[in-house]
Image (spheres, grey):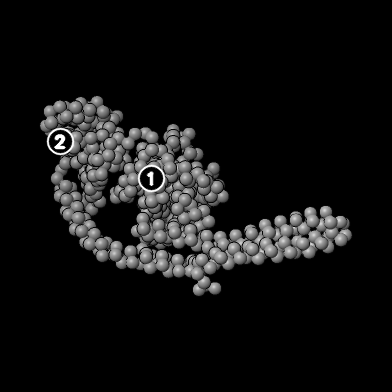
Amino acid sequence: MPKLTLRLRVFLFFCLIALGSLCSVLAAIWLGHARALETGPADGFLFAAIVAGFLILGITAGVWLLFDENVAKPIERLAAQMRSRAHAGVEADLDTKAARYLGDLAPAASAVARQLGDSALSTAQAVASETARLEAEKARLTALLTEIPVATILVTPGGQIALYDAQAAEILSQIGVPRLNARISEYFAAKSLDAAVGKLHKSGKDVRFTAQSPDGTQSFDARLKPMRDGGYLMVIDSQTLDISPEAERPLVYDFDLLDQGDAGSDFAERPLRQLCFSVFDTETTGLLPHKDEIVQLGAVRVLNGRIVPGERIDQLVDPGRPIPPGATRVHRISDAMVRGKPRIAEVARRFHDFSREAVIVAHNAPFDMAFLHRHAHTTGLTWDHPILDTVLLSAVLFGASEKHTLDALCERLGVTIPDAMRHTAIGDAQATAEVLVRMLPMLEAQGLTTFGAVIEETRRHGRLLEDLN
């Protein structure tokens, strides 16, 4: 049987339907004839028709189940695996065992994938070598900038942050959560900043001014330097900052932001690649959002299809109640670890700022969001962000019949979660972000290029979340 061609297999399915239907009709005629001898011809013919109809329906349903399990599902699974290799860079071998009844289709697909993988390997090696060189240069530049006692922020023509260094991150964190693509006016008072920017554009020369925090409690000596593209470089005297030599010194940037205009407020029309995603996960005292509490929140940001290094939240939360031993066995967070940590109101506000003007993403988002919504009346926060769920994205890309757990999705897309990071909020958030980055090009390959188109497609699978929760 495994050596039969796919065309012959499909032909045999039709033969089975025809043979089953013929046998059903003959059986129905025989039973109808026996019934006619007892109750009359009319009753016998009616009985035969009913029996034949039910038998044919049963045969058709049975053959369809065989076809679906041995042909349709394997083809769908094989196509999804090919898409993940073509668009998400997955390198694992194709699972040909499930497609063993598809004739030469699975070996042919495997051969194509292997050939493409071999061709891509040499290219990847060259890219890796160049990337390593660029990373080394970036490390030297970061170290150099850290030694200079100024904070540097690159601002786009639209007023969004496109680059900030370690000193700038220190200053921005005193006012809010440092974020690429955030508006510079979120961190500095608009009145003095707008006046300085206006003077900059008018004169085309450097402008010195005093930058103030929005609440007016902090002020900084700053200078604006014009850039050719209409943006500007904001340089702040940071001599008073005390940055530990052992502290992480990020140079966070995305120069693609310089070429993007103001995206506007209509998320539905925005291209997927230009969206900002705030990917998060929580660990809790239990599985009941109406009464359990968050004990850890982790989040990372994805911008222009890439995870932004350095922009993350990894925060333990004091739940205000004992953590059950069963929950501790899962996430390894004890009462001693959360003692003295911030309460959920403070952490929720920080995450809310972290997610400003972004799409919130989670794996089974209704569960995690339910905890935040429950505390909305005490925090005063409105969680009206667009929401994207990787469970539903998995269903769109791989079919509703597949497994959609985070572990299954990571295995499917070649994402590795270190054992020490599994069932930690930041570990699962990082894994979800990596999964999202791999799925974005796969969605675009299916013609789902805007956020609205993706949401419309995920609504078809909403029942999955209802069953999951």
Q: Is residue 365 left or right of residue 28?
A: left
Closer mark to the observer between disc 2 and disc 1:
1
| The image quarter in which residue 355 lies | top left
Residue at image point 50% right, 73% down = 3
Q: Amino acid at mark 1?
A: Thr
Q: Which numbered dot is residue 225? A: 2
Residue at image point 86% right, 56% down = 40
Q: Is residue 119 left or right of residue 315?
A: left
| Quadrant that contains the N terminus | bottom right
The answer to whether residue 195 shows anywhere in this view is yes
Q: Is residue 205 left or right of residue 331?
A: left
Mark 2 surroundings within 10 Å by alpha-carbon count, few (fewer than 14), some (14 through 19), many (20 or more): some
> What SS does tag 2 mark?
strand
Near-viewer residue (326 or 258): 258
> What SS does tag 1 mark?
loop
Near-viewer residue (87 or 285): 87
| Residue 98 placement (x, y as % from top left) | 49, 66
| Residue 67 placement (x, y as % from top left) | 57, 62
| Residue 256 placement (x, y as % from top left) | 25, 44
The residue that mark 1 highlights is 449
Q: Amino acid at mark 2?
A: Lys
User: N-terminal of the two: label 2 or label 1?
Assistant: 2
Q: Is residue 177 left or right of residue 410?
A: left
The residues tagged by marks 2 and 1 sit, at their Cα atoms, a distance apart of: 37 Å
